[in-house]
Image (cartoon, grey):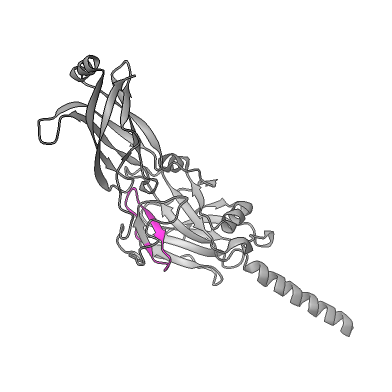
């Protein structure tokens, strides 16, 4: 009988150690970034980003599955949940990389590919996004935004809950190293733009502090071909940290000190981290001049905004040639 009790005691102790080890296999996963809508207010452009610095020790074992992203309103009412792929979470943790749950519109806006498709709408005014497993309480990490009347309880073994402001259109709430939260230019699948700021607005503070400065559009070439319809193709590059670029491009002829002549203009949009050839329809007089000369030097002015609404004007010189 004593032998039986001893065996049972040893088995229970081993199970306890096993459970304790398994408990630690996902506890460093945290909600790292949340975006609610584009700069134009499009609520289809949404994402939640997770991040786990635990490395290969984060195993997301079946014993504590299912793993979920759960969305709540400000009063703690569940709005929906998304089942997460444990193998994907494990791979991201091992690589110390961001794990993105995004809409297709967000992928298109930022030129990224989410790890999973976001199929739960994020509330615009105030809300809570939580990473959950099956212990009690199940939430191991939450990011909340706006005024929360009933915070979701988090497990003491997790990374806890952090609160940020309601991000402005085109911005995202981003968790900093000190667990404060700021609203800044979105950085899906990349380190938060305010990560090196050393501070932040914290719970409920104002947005934008510490965000990366928008550098404006770059010019990928000094020559541009003009097609038979009189459209010049100008190659523009949008910074990867911008969240997407949009604005107006204008071609002129003449120096800064002399009178300039407008050759043409066009509206454009370029995805973050991408280069795109924007077509600018030349005026009738510009087309005649190009036909006579064969090539034409023009100044390019680009008035652009990033996804957070930050504006920047850049300029260059380009040689137009008939294609």
Residue 285 drawn above or below residue 164: above
197 and 158: which is toward the camera: 197
Residue 105, position as x, y percentages in the image: 44, 40
Q: Is residue 173 magenta?
A: yes
Residue span colored magenta:
165-181
Q: Quadrant of the C terminus?
A: top left
Residue 257 in view in this figure:
yes
Residue 148 in view in this figure:
no
Residue 43, position as x, y percentages in the image: 39, 44
Q: Quadrant of the N terminus?
A: bottom right
Residue 307, position as x, y percentages in the image: 33, 46
Residue 275, position as x, y percentages in the image: 39, 36
Q: Residue at x 54, y 46 (%)?
A: 116
Tally of marks: 0
Residue 316 drawn above or below residue 63: above
- Farthest residue toward the left? 258
The image quarter containing residue 158 is bottom right
Q: Is residue 299 magenta?
A: no
Horizontally, residue 95 falls left or right of residue 106, namely right
Q: Residue at x 31, y 29 (%)?
A: 223
Instruction: Please tell me whether the stretch drawn in magenta is mainly helix, strand or loop.
Output: loop
- Farthest residue toward the bottom? 2
96 and 8: which is toward the camera: 96
Horizontally, residue 101 falls left or right of residue 298, namely right
Residue 295 drawn above or below residue 90: above
Horizontally, residue 12 falls left or right of residue 321, namely right
């Amino acid at each position: 009988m004593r032998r039986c009790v001893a065996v049972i005691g040893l088995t229970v102790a081993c199970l306890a150690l096993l459970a304790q080890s398994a408990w630690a296999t996902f506890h460093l996963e945290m909600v790292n970034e949340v975006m609610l809508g584009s700069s134009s207010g499009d609520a289809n452009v949404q994402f939640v980003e997770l991040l786990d610095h635990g490395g290969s020790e984060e195993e997301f074992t079946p014993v504590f599955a299912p793993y979920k992203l759960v969305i709540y309103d400000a009063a703690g009412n569940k709005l929906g949940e998304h089942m997460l792929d444990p193998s994907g979470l494990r791979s991201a943790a091992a690589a110390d990389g961001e794990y993105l749950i995004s809409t297709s519109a967000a992928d298109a806006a930022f030129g990224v590919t989410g790890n999973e498709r976001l199929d739960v709408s994020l509330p615009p005014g105030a809300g809570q996004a939580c990473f959950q497993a099956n212990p009690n309480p199940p939430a191991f990490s939450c990011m909340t935004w706006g005024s929360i009347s009933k915070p979701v309880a988090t497990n003491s073994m997790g990374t806890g809950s952090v609160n940020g402001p309601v991000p402005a259109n085109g911005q995202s709430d981003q968790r900093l190293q000190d667990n404060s939260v700021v609203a800044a230019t979105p950085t899906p699948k990349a380190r938060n733009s305010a990560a090196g700021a050393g501070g932040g607005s914290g719970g409920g503070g104002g947005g934008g502090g510490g965000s990366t400065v928008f550098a404006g559009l770059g010019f990928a070439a000094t020559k541009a071909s003009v097609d038979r319809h009189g459209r010049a193709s100008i190659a523009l590059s949008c910074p990867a940290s911008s969240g997407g670029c949009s604005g107006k491009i204008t071609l002129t002829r003449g120096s800064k000190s002399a009178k300039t002549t407008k050759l043409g203009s066009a509206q454009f949009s370029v995805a973050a981290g991408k280069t795109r050839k924007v077509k600018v329809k030349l005026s009738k007089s510009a087309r005649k001049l190009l036909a006579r000369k064969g090539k034409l030097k023009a100044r390019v002015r680009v008035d652009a905004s990033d996804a957070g609404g930050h504006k920047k004007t850049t300029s260059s010189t380009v040689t137009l040639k008939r294609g």
